Amino acid sequence: MADFLNRVQRSERMALIRSRGNKDTEVALVKLLRRNEIKGWRRHRQVFGKPDFVFSKPRVVIFVDGCFWHRCPMHSRHVRKSSVYWQKKLKTNQARDRLVTRTLRQAGWRVLRVWEHELAKRNEARLLRRIRRALADL
């Protein structure tokens, strides 16, 4: 099915979607970090790629990636409506993620990418171990 909006209209509509403060992802990680007394992080610092959390001294950044928007291998699904548009959009997101990760690592940052589903209560212990290991390894 063809997109019912033209390119400019689609761009304007997509620009209205804000990527900050998503309660299912970023805010859930804030609560997890606070509950477990993991300190030293700041949100939305001016670092290449706009990481969600920045630990400046150990040079660790965390990105919280939504399973749909970043094509989680466990939860990615095929979009039927406007599939050409969405396939291109999601592939572009993945390419940008790879570029950002590579660039930050080359600049000496440790990059953690957390999937939305990793924030579920049942995955919490594993996620905490990953974060603590990243902060301690350096």
Image (cartoon, rainbow, N blue to C red):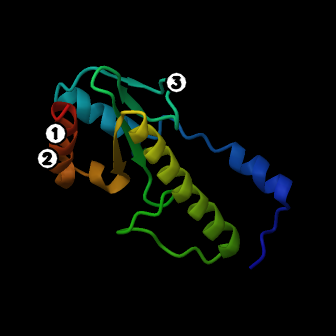
Q: Earlier in the sequence, mark 2 or mark 3?
A: 3
Pointers 1 and 3 in contact (C-beta within 8 Å): no
The reply, left or right, for residue 24 in relation to residue 138 is: right
Against 70, residue 2 (above or below) is: below
The kind of residue tagged 3 is Gln
Q: Residue furthest front?
A: 106
Q: CA distance from mark 1 to mark 3?
A: 24 Å
Category of crowding for the residue at label 1, using alpha-carbon neighbours closer than 10 angstroms: few (below 14), some (14–19), many (at least 20): few
The kind of residue tagged 2 is Ala
Q: Which residue is mark 3?
A: 46
Q: Which residue is mark 2?
A: 125
Q: Residue at x 44, y 38 (%)?
A: 104
Category of crowding for the residue at label 3, using alpha-carbon neighbours closer than 10 angstroms: few (below 14), some (14–19), many (at least 20): few
Q: CA distance from mark 2 to mark 3?
A: 29 Å
Pointers 1 and 2 in contact (C-beta within 8 Å): no
> Is 127 in front, or is 110?
110
> Is 94 in front, or is 24?
94
Instruction: Determine the image quadrant of residue 107.
Output: top left
Mark count:
3
Which circle, 1 or 2, is nearer the viewer?
1
The spot of residue 103 in percent (x, y) is 48, 41
The reply, left or right, for residue 126 in relation to residue 28 is: left
Q: Earlier in the sequence, mark 1 or mark 2?
A: 2
Q: Which residue is mark 1?
A: 133
What kind of element bears circle 3?
Answer: loop
Which circle, 2 or 3, is nearer the viewer?
3
What kind of element bears circle 1?
Answer: helix
The kind of residue tagged 1 is Arg
Instruction: Determine the image quadrant of residue 106.
Output: top left
What kind of element bears circle 2?
Answer: helix
Q: Residue at x 26, y 52 (%)?
A: 120
